[in-house]
Image (cartoon, grey):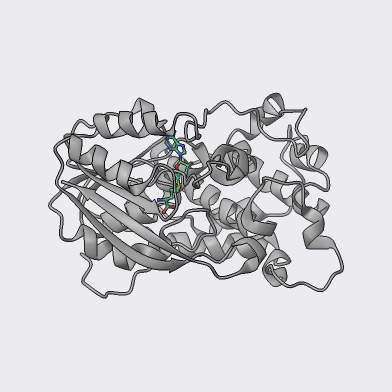
Amino acid sequence: MIKEKEHFSLQSTRYQGSKRKLIPWMSTIFKDLEFENVLDVFGGTGVVSYLFKLMGKSVVYNDYLEFNHQIGISLIENQNVRLETKDINHLINNSKLDSGNQGFISSTFKNIYYKENENIWLDNVISKIHNLNSYDSKTLRYKKAIAFNALFQSCLVKRPFNLFHRNNLSIRTRRVQRTFGNKTTWERSFEDLFIRYTKEINDLVIHTKYKCEAICKPVSGLNSNGFDLVYLDPPYLNKDGKNETANYFDIYHFLEGITIYPDWSNNIDKGSKNLKLINYKENIFKKDNIYNVYDLMFDKFKNCIIVLSYKSDGLPSIQFLTNRLKQLGKNVRIKSLDYSYSLKKNNKDKRDREFIIIGV
Ligand SMILES: C[S@@+](CC[C@H](N)C(=O)[O-])C[C@H]1O[C@@H](n2cnc3c(N)ncnc32)[C@H](O)[C@@H]1O
């Protein structure tokens, strides 16, 4: 069990919208609420689910993207499996590509996201993760998930802006004076990063006596049965509803592609400049239907305690959201915190306000 002001060991990650830095603050809020079974609807990096796990709750982690689901399996559902040194060595052993592997990334994504030698490394390791065997199916589920998680973190830190929304490898490779970015991390080898993240994940695997599970569904496919609290941290839409990074499928399509590696070639949107995955998971967080989406979500979870993360200047407004919760008979409280986001236009350290809206 965690204690107040205790140091939190959490997975390091560069994921858009991650609540990692807010976890100590959030823990003080959750500890004042009475609940045992919690659903984390928009799980992302899993840091909030991990907090619930540390608090001794029974947690269901959910995210509609399969790559995030793997992260949830590795750290939330997994109670005791680790990727051992022999597994790591097997995966990164730099032998020829497994038979049948055509080197899909190196032949398809030349000069788009990673350098050529990195693409070959990725092809090799990804096909080995998919082909891992020699364990029972349950152990394999967790070993593969740890390996995928470590690989995703390695992929993220080597990308400018930690995203895949643009064909911008040249930001990494151009010989220019840099005013931003992390050149040293970009140039660390995939192998070093993969080993480092695997160790970190292994150290974070914890066993609790409460059932924890990771699932992968759109919010529309979930129901509230069995939960006394739902935590909602949906994609952030700014006031004019135009931020291009609100669509998680689009900005992380490459990681999603890794999870369907054997079938990736059949799912490439060949008309897109940066060879995105065909978008088969609808983004419902758009200006034209955002109000309706919140109404449906709140109605679905109205019998649970609803805890909603909200960032200043978002759509809908905080007034709209609190009014809707009150209309459902909820007693509403709002907590807030000044918070600085580092990746702002012109790299200015703009201060945002982070809110937690609680409807009991
Ligand atoms: C703001 S992020 C959540 C961040 C997370 N709380 C954390 O701390 O890492 C929003 C998440 O919602 C997921 N998402 C987007 N649309 C979804 C949908 N319709 N159903 C379920 N998850 C969705 C995205 O994949 C993304 O990971």
Note whether 31 is above or below 4 in the view shown: above
Query: Which quarter of the frame holds ligand 1?
Result: top left
Classify residue 223 as left or right of residue 292.
left
Q: Residue at x 40, y 51 (%)?
A: 46
Residue 91 on image: x %, y %: 62, 51
Q: Nearer the viewer, residue 153 or 100?
A: 153
Q: Nearer the viewer, residue 165 or 131?
A: 165
Q: Nearer the viewer, residue 282 or 205?
A: 282
Note whether 256 is above or below 313 in the view shown: above
Q: Residue at x 83, y 48 (%)?
A: 111
Q: Residue at x 73, y 66 (%)?
A: 187
Which quadrant holds residue 178? bottom right
Quadrant (top left/top right/bottom left/bottom right) for the N terminus: bottom left
Residue 140 on image: x %, y %: 46, 41
Q: Nearer the viewer, residue 287 or 33?
A: 287
Classify residue 341 as left or right of residue 294.
right
Residue 9 on image: x %, y %: 38, 68
